[in-house]
Each structure stands twice: as C-alpha cells, then as structure tokens.
Amino acid sequence: MATKLLLPLFLSLLVAAAMGRQQELSQAQQCRFQQLRASQPSQRLESEGGITEMWDEYEDQFQCAGVAPLRNTLRPNSLSLPNFHPAPRLVYIEQGQGLLGVNIPGCAETFNSRQSSRSQHGREEEQEQQQEQGQSRRDQHQKVHRVRQGDIVAIPAGASHWCFNDGNEELVAVSITDLNNPANQLDQKLRAFYLAGSPPSRGQQSQQARETFQNIFRAFDEELMSEAFNVPREVVRKMQQEDEERGIIVNVRQGMRVIRPSEEEEEQEQRQGGQGSNGFEETFCSTKLRTNLDNPREADVYSRQAGRLNIANQHKLPILRFLDLSAEKGNLYPNALITPHWSMNGHSVIYVTRGEAQVQIVSHNGQTLLNDRVSQGNMFVVPQFFATTAKAGRNGFEYVAFKTTKSPMKSPLAGYTSVFRAMPLQVITNSYQCSPSEAQDLKMSRGGQSLLLSPQRGSSS
C-alpha cells in the first residue's frame, strides 16, 4: 500500500524536476543565437496626442535580456494616460520636458492647493480657478515630478503613472520593462494595465498592440463600478470610454493644472537633498525617482580626449536598489573608442541617441555576433559576459545603456584597469608566445586611460 502511494509521488517529482530542467534549458537557450543586429521598432500605435512604438519583444536578443523596449512620443499639450505594469521600468527622456506623476500605493497626498505652489500656467490662473470652483474643490495629490531631456526615471512595478507634455516641442521617452524581474510573477510578455483610454480603431494597429494596451474598466460591470465609486452610471461610462478614437495618448482639452512648487523652490530642495545624502534617510514614499545623465560636471568617467560616462546606479539613485536596474549615458568624441570589455553582472540594452559607431560583439565560441555600424534610433543587446567594443564615427557617438543590475561592473581588456595589468608579465608572454617587450606593451600601452580610449593619430572612422 505504501509502495502504491510512494510511486505516484516519486513519478510526479520526476516530472516536476524534468519540467523545471526543461524550463531552465529553454531560458538558457534564449541567449544562444548566431548573430545580433541593431533593430528598430516593429510596431507603431498612433493616438490623437502622440505615437507609441514597440520593438519586437520576442526577438532573440530581447528574449535573452528579458526586456521589452518601448518609445513614446508626446506632442505638446498631450497626456499619456494613467497606467501600470507588472514589472519595473526604466525611462530615458530623449527629448523635451514634461510633468510626470508616479503614484505609490499607500503614500499620502502631500501636495495640496492650500500650500504655496505654482501651477503650470502660474499662480494667478490657479487663484482664479480656486475662486471659480470654491474652497470645496481644492485639490490634493501625490508629488508631481518635472522631467527633462537627459533624465533617467525609475518606475516601480504596479505603480500607476502618467505624463503630460507642457513644453513647446515633442517629448520623446525611451524605456525598457524588465520582464525577468522577480516582481513580475506573470509570464515574459509586455502588459500595460490602463486606467483610461484604449487603442484606437483607425489605422493599421497590430492585434498584439490592441491586446497590450486596454482600459481595465471596460471589462467591469457598469452597475458594480457605479456602486464601488458611488458615482452615477454616466460617469462610469466615461471611465470605460467606448469611443476608441482617442487612443492612449490624448490631447488635453480642458486645461491641465497640477500643484507644484516653484522652479526655484524645487531646485533649492534638490540641492539641499543632495548634500550628504546616502539614501538611508529616504522613505519609499519620498524616494527620488529620477536623475539627469546629461550633466558633464557629474560625469563618473571623463577623458579630455575621448569623452565621458554618466552612470545611474543604486548609489546615485537609491530606488534602483529595489528595482535591480541601472543606466549609463555615454558621450564619445569623434573616433574615440570604448575599451574592449565584458559586463560581469548583467545584460546591457543599448539605445543610440546621436551619431554613429562601429560596434563589435563576440561570443564565448569566438564567433562575431555583431560587426556593424549603428546610428540614431537603433537598439541592440550586449549579453552578460559577451565581449564588446565600439568606435565612434566622425561626428561622435552618444548612447544610453539600460542595465539589468543595480550595480553594473565591467572588466576591461585594455587600459590601466585591464585584466592584463593584473597579470604577471610571464603569463602574458607564455599565453601569446610573445616577447617580454610586446607583453609589456599589452599591459602599459594605454597609460592612464581606462574605459574610454582616445583615437590614435591618423585614426579615422
């Protein structure tokens, strides 16, 4: 009897182990590809207020990194509707400026209209609005962030967020969603849970796009929602928005006023907060969500001949500790090089923001996976441990790298922090059958240069 009970249990354990092993092999095979390529968005979703472009998340390189890339373009005076997603997201503001709201569940509405504040159109219009609506209509909400070109913004999984373009030019935001993150207990598929809007019916919209961006209120029962919110059914019908023509980025028709400190007060608060701040004094509700990667004075790596690197990791932006993500902005001068190196603890998703470069990526088996010229708008993945290098073109090269680790580490092959500098001379001479002087050149030829290498005389791209 005991044997009859144990045998099915043993078989079920074997099946479970086999399925688990199969899943591990399947995930490992996602990084076994013959080549990489610089890719462009494959899908485009047009709304009345802007455009949403998606890279193919099922492309081998993005499956390897476990990310879903996205690019949103908001026209002036347009609003990206509130939504949330089941995995953390890193956003880079490529162009323009705007207002961003990230709503953390359980946090207080610390901004209210009774405080000294400035709306988008100034204090006078805010006072006029208060006089028209009366004291009972005074608003309060969580903090609203000003985002500008060069900002990297961290959005936690499950936090609803919206963005409004209050500038005079288009706001372009490039992002990756980390589908492999432990916060996402669903499968590796891009999902966006919208609280308003819906994909427009006009135009050639793919079925995948229509399934990804849907208003969750449309599926709820109208009567049930009316009771839950204690509002008339007419309001619920407006929430469900059966009219599909507006899309998920809409034009603002009734004005857009939010409670914000003045620009001077906000800059002063940031300066004071940056003095001696180590992140421990922050609570999750008041944690900093953004930092700018375009400021040359805050460069983490700088070479007068080669360029600079600005890095956002868990130390500079403490919330990244919880998201296990980071970012790097590179600015290479004409014909400068990124030293050959590999990433020790994460994948890198590279998006080209300006210029062009010759990029090479090689795998463990000595195969060249990518040897191509990349330019503005291209995106490609450098898998963990795969060696890579890049040489900027005649007009320089700028990129932003999204990294799937909170504290990225590189192992350079050339420069004063290279692996050759750490090796005894005789190891190099015997490894390459070279003379001691040649081995010494391998160790010392780049002098004090490290991650960024200046072009040699006569070098051209």
Image (cartoon, grey):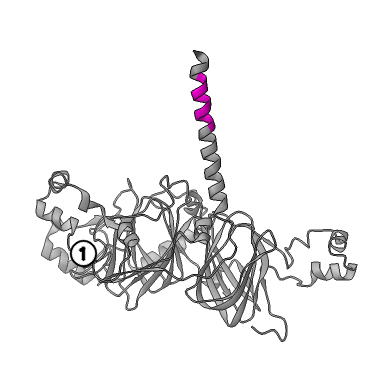
- Relative to 107, 272 lies left or right: right
Residue located at (47% from left, 74% from top): 377
> Which amino acid lies under the numbered mark 1 shown in the image of this protein?
Glu
Q: Is residue 423 magenta?
A: no
Is residue 144 among the parts visible in the rendering?
Answer: no
Depth check: give the residue in front, 58 or 154. 58
Is residue 353 among the parts visible in the rendering?
Answer: yes
Q: Main secondary structure of the magenta part?
A: helix
Looking at the image, residue 149 lies above or below residue 106? below
Q: Position of residue 154 (x, y in %)?
A: 43, 58
Looking at the image, residue 460 lies above or below residue 183? below
At mark 1, the secondary structure is loop
Q: Position of residue 189 (x, y in %)?
A: 41, 53
Depth check: give the residue in front, 457 or 18. 18
Residue located at (13% from left, 55% from top): 235
Q: Position of residue 314 (x, y in %)?
A: 53, 54
The image quarter in which residue 94 lies = bottom left
The magenta span reads 6-14
Residue located at (82% from left, 71% from top): 441
- Relative to 143, 402 lies left or right: right
**Circle 1 crowding by C-alpha within 10 Å: few under 14, some 14–19, many from 20:** some
Q: Position of residue 363 (x, y in %)?
A: 65, 61
The image quarter in which residue 176 lies = bottom left
Instruction: Report the residue marked by disc 1.
Output: 244
